Every structure is written in C-alpha cells, then in structure tokens.
Image: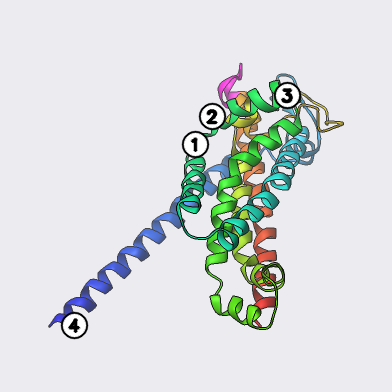
Amino acid sequence: MMIGNKKLTQSIFFWLFRIMSTVVVLVLLTILYFVFSRGISTISWDFLTKAPEDGMVKGGIFPAIIGTLYLIGGSLLFAFPIGVFSAIYMHEYIKKGKIKSFLQLMTNNLAGVPSIVFGLFGMALFVNKLKFGDSIIAGSLTLGLLVLPVIIRTTEEALKAVDDNYRMASYAMGASKLYTIKKIILPIALPDIITGLILSIGRVSGETAPILFTVAAYFLPKLPHSIYDQVMALPYHLYVLATSGTNIEEARPVAFGTALVLVMIVLVTNLIANGVRAYYHSKYKK
C-alpha cells in the first residue's frame, strides 16, 4: 500500500513538472510570436543597414545594432575573465570558513541589486569620477559589473560539479594545484561555465537602466569612432520609441521591428555559445 501511494505521489509530481514546463515553453512561444508577427513587416535591408532619421520613425537602426554589439562584447570582455578567475579563487583556494561564506553572501547580494542602482553607480564612478563621460567604456564596465555575480556563481557551481577524484588523481601524480586547475578542472567545467556566459549575454543585451546613465544616446545616427564615444543601443532605442514618440501609430511598427532584431541578436549569440558548449562537452566527454 505504501509503495502504491509513493508511486501515485511521484506520478502526480512528474505530471505537475511536465505541465509547468509546457506552460513555460508556451509563454516563450507566445512572446516570440507576438513580437515576430508585429515586427517582421518592418524588417528590410534598409531598416537593418541605415541610420535613423525623422524623429527615429524612419530610416533604420544600424547604429543601435552596432552599439548593442559593442556593449555586449565590451561588458563580457571585462566581466567574463574576472568572474571566472574570482570563482576559481573562491572555490579552489579559499578554505571553508567565515571568509568564504562572507564572499559568497556578498556575491549573492550583488546579484540582487536592481539594475538602476548599477546605472547610478556607473554614472558616479565611470562617467564622473574617472572622467570617461557618457561612453562605450563607461557603459561596458557598468554592464560588466551587473553580470559579474552571475558569472561567478555559475562558474563556481561548474567547478563544484567536477568530481574530486580528478583532483586527487592529479595531485597523486605530482601535479601542482595550478596545473590541475588549468589542464584538468577547467576543461571539464568549461561547458557549464559557458552557461554563465549565455545568461550574461541575455542580461546585458536587454538592460536599459544601466546604459541610460552611462552611454546611451537619444538620437545619434552615426557609428562611434572610439570607446569614449556615445552610442545608440537597441534597448534604449526601443524604450524611446515606445514612450516618447510624437506619433504612436507611426512609431509602433518600428518599435516591434527593433524588438524583433534585439531578440534575434540574443538568439543568435546564444546559439553560438551553445554550439561552443556542446563542442567542448563532447570533446571532454570522450
């Protein structure tokens, strides 16, 4: 009787999980269909390759696309190595105790700070104190700080998932800790570390508040010439079209087209990152 009740309970929970998973997928597909059906008619070669004009409701969004790619690349160039090295230090070098618990607590708290606070901090430090001004470097560093705790936590979990037997076997062969981490631990954990990179790409590409104070330009129909220039960015461009347009009906198709391009950029970058993760997973699984 007890075994029958356990099987029934297990079956109920499995069905609940299936239903919740289905709901999540349906919500995602609904959002994608909503954006795609309203934005696809706006997509054209001119829309993707020309600068905006006439109050941003005409022309294209090419400067905003390039600006978004600059910010994604710049922020991850800063945050990814620092996050990975920080996680390695916290997991492989610091022993369990108050210091490690404190660092993990601070990392978790940093992940919960609202993005608008990062924007204000970035404006105070990078824009004003360090005299970078509203620029790509100021926006990239601010966005890098935003995703840094995500990279640290996902990397730390990836390192935890590596079996300790690999470490013990390496040490038994006379290898140093640094060699073990570099040649054994990191290659095994790399597919899961890339998960943090994927999450960071999605977070960075869609943030508006941090770039509002540090880099985003309202209307700048030209490409930047250095990291100290302002840029347009798709999230802020979309925000402006949705809230500040003088002609809502005319701006709406452009807004949905911009949203569709932003979704496609995130999708393509995620697919590339997933391909890299799958490659390394199959490589070190053999």
**Circle 3 is placed at which residue position?**
134
Circles 3 and 2 in contact, beta carbons < 8 Å: no
Q: Point out the tag, 1 or 4, that comes first from the N-terminus.
A: 4
Q: Position of residue 249 (x, y in %)?
A: 58, 24
Is residue 153 inside the magenta stretch?
no
Q: Which colour scheme is used?
A: rainbow
**Circle 4 is placed at which residue position?**
3
Circles 2 and 1 in contact, beta carbons < 8 Å: yes
| Distance CA(mark 3)–CA(mark 4) | 65 Å
* Amino acid identity at mark 4: Ile
Residue 117 numbered tag: 2
Q: Point out the tag, 1 or 3, that comes first from the N-terminus.
A: 1
Q: Quadrant of the N terminus?
A: bottom left
| Distance CA(mark 3)–CA(mark 2) | 17 Å
Identify which residue is drawn at 37% across, 65% down: 18
Q: Point out the tag, 3 or 4, that comes first from the N-terminus.
A: 4
Identify which residue is drawn at 62% across, 61% down: 193
Q: Residues within 10 Å of mark 1 (few under 14, many from 20)?
A: few
**Which span of residues is magenta-colored?**
242-249
- Judged from the image, the secondary structure of the residue bearing numbered disc 3 is loop
Circles 1 and 4 in contact, beta carbons < 8 Å: no
Above or below, 116 against 1 in this view is above
Is residue 248 inside the magenta stretch?
yes
Of circles 1 and 4, which is in front?
Answer: 1
- Judged from the image, the secondary structure of the residue bearing numbered disc 1 is loop
- Judged from the image, the secondary structure of the residue bearing numbered disc 2 is helix
| Distance CA(mark 2)–CA(mark 1) | 7 Å
Q: Residues within 10 Å of mark 3 (few under 14, many from 20)?
A: many
Of circles 2 and 4, which is in front?
Answer: 2
